[in-house]
Image (cartoon, helix red, strand yellow):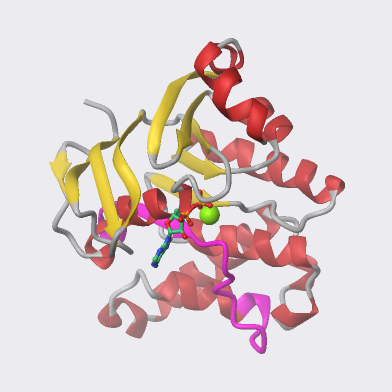
Amino acid sequence: MSLLEAREIKKNFGKLTALKGASLSVESNEFHGLIGPNGSGKSTFMKCLVGAESPSSGSVWFDGVDISRSSSQARARRGMSLKFQITSVLPALSLYDNLLLALQGHSSLTELLFSRTRHRLHDEVMTALEKFKLADRATDSASELSHGQQQWLEIAMALASHPKVLLLDEPTGGMSLEERRITGELLMPIKKVCSLVIVEHDLDFIRDFCDRLTVLDQGAVLDTGTVAEIQNSSKVQEVYLRRV
Ligand code: ADP
Ligand code: MG
């Protein structure tokens, strides 16, 4: 069984059907791209996976367990982490404190009372900041960062819980070309430790970094396969590439 499996997810918002029975499977250490035109249901699908929205029907399996009825907190504890399009960074706090809060969220209160934990947390904060090229900005407030750097801080925060799968919804939105390139470089090493599900409009980015793709169109999966398979898919060429 795959690490993450969504089976026949349907989602209605009143009369509107956002997802018509979409399925997805993601293996361990796989980078999986979710692409499709605006309004095709990508964000809704991601939210159904992590429990931020409840599907009208269908099931989600993670690590061999049916988590369809689990809260988003319970899913996070099992190892799912989502970074939304909208930022969750606290702008007035320093980068250090933002990351510390993200890490502390995953330590118990008793753990936090022991100074050894505080040392460990300090090391983890600094390691995470270094990985995302932000260590020299540790004491700056997050509001001073560029848009791209804020996104990196958020990815670092989403990784603080050591998830088995990280879900990113348009992480490079609003980034410069150079920031996009760096984002790809920063994400590559993550593959050793977790899987990635990424929604992205930049097809060059997707081509460079994803192992497999799922293409959504009007709430349904049009096709799924390797990047090469999707590039050669007549279904995708007909419907998706013509419209984007
Ligand atoms: P994408 O991320 O691919 O652009 P979305 O998942 O955001 O697409 O949206 C899919 C469809 O569902 C759109 O028609 C959108 O307007 C609708 N939708 C998304 N979220 C809601 C909501 N909370 N309430 C009502 N309609 C929604
Ligand atoms: Mg979206």
Q: Is 82 part of what is drawn in magenta? A: yes
Q: Where is residue 58 in the image (x, y as percent from the top left)?
A: 18, 43
**Residue 134 seen in the current view:** no
Instruction: Name the quadrant containing residue 242.
Output: top right
Q: Position of residue 192 (x, y in %)?
A: 50, 33
Instruction: Name the quadrant containing residue 114.
Output: bottom left
At x 58% / y 29%, what residue is drawn?
240
At x 60% / y 37%, what residue is drawn?
189
**Image height of 91 relative to 62, above or below:** below
Magenta-highlighted residues: 76-96
Question: Which quadrant is home to the N terminus?
Answer: top left
**Residue 48 seen in the current view:** yes
Q: Nearer the viewer, residue 215 or 20?
A: 20
Tag count: 0
Q: Position of residue 90 (x, y in %)?
A: 59, 82
Q: Residue reaching furthest front?
A: 15
Q: Nearer the viewer, residue 8 or 71?
A: 8
- On screen, residue 157 versus residue 113, left or right, reads right
- On screen, residue 215 versus residue 205, left or right, reads left
At x 40% / y 44%, what residue is drawn?
165
Q: Is 131 part of what is drawn in magenta? A: no
Q: Nearer the viewer, residue 244 or 15?
A: 15
At x 59% / y 64%, what residue is drawn?
154
- On screen, residue 74 versus residue 177, left or right, reads left
Q: Nearer the viewer, residue 10 or 112?
A: 10
Question: Which quadrant is home to the C terminus?
Answer: top right
